[in-house]
Amino acid sequence: TSISFARYLPETKFDADYIDRTYVSIIPPQFATDATKLMNITFDKIKTINRSAFANCTSLTSVYLPDNVEVIDTNAFEGCSLLADVRLPEGKCSTVTTKLFAGCTSLKTINIPSNFQTIGQEAFLGCSALESINLGDNSQISNIGKAAFKDCVKLASFVIPNTCKAYATDIFSGCTSLTSVNLSNNSYNKKIADNMFENTAVTEIHLSSNYNQIGNNAFKGDRKSTRLNSS
């Protein structure tokens, strides 16, 4: 059963520190936006989380998304500054949408299951504690959006999988701890995108032999010399 809670929002200020609504399948847009006392969420039968549903829930520390979740809309958890533990669904959900976790400054690691195909624009923008993005050996990521990991200042390395057919500009811009990126298994792309490594600490990039272009401002910013290794 799909239930809209929009009419209850003025009365319920989400002061409870835990929500377990097993009967909910659709979460409306801005359902709990700015619910600053909400700490944990568990949804057993949810299928859709609409845009900004839990944006700016600044006390939210963990989110468990079961495998039956099919859609997580844009900005759903943007600005959840204490969010440190996220479990993404392994099922039909295929997109880490635009600004989904932007500004989640306590998130240190994220595991992206093999059912995901797209990492959207600014999906992890400004996740200043993010150190590890685990795609797994069977990753099916085919598209990475603009500025997807911009200003993730703790991210040190990243492997773009061989399934990635397109990535946009600025995806690592401002990742000041980033030293190594591996593109050696990626045969779909020919160009290091514009501003891709702007203001990073990259010193070594492993490329596949099909790369033959370097975009505008790809390595803009002070750094040691960057070694490009082609295989």
Image (cartoon, helix red, strand yellow):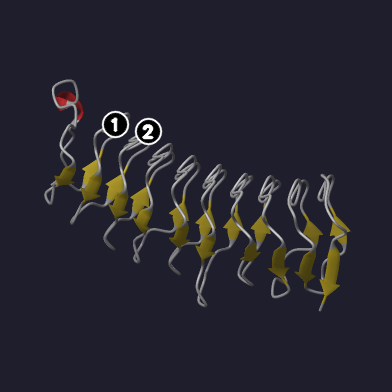
Q: Which residue is mark 1?
A: 36
Does residue 115 appear to the left or right of 21 in the view shown?
right
Q: Is residue 186 above or below residue 107?
A: below
Image point 61% across, 49% down: which residue?
A: 153
Q: Residues within 10 Å of mark 2 (few under 14, many from 20)?
A: many
Depth check: 46 or 108 in front?
108
Q: Which residue is mark 2?
A: 56
| Percent coordinates x, y for residue 162 in the rendering | 64, 72
User: Could you tell me the amino acid type at mark 2?
Assistant: Asn
Image point 71% across, 69% down: which residue?
A: 183
Q: Is residue 138 above or below residue 133?
A: below
Does residue 80 appear to the left or right of 12 in the view shown?
right
Q: Is residue 31 above or below residue 220?
A: above
User: Could you tell me the amino acid type at mark 1?
Assistant: Thr
| Percent coordinates x, y for residue 101 in the rendering | 45, 45
Image point 67% across, 54% down: which residue?
A: 177
Q: Quadrant of residue 94?
A: bottom left
Q: Quadrant of residue 76?
A: top left
Q: Residues within 10 Å of mark 1 (few under 14, many from 20)?
A: some
Is any part of residue 177 visible from this angle? Answer: yes
Q: What SS does tag 2 mark? A: loop
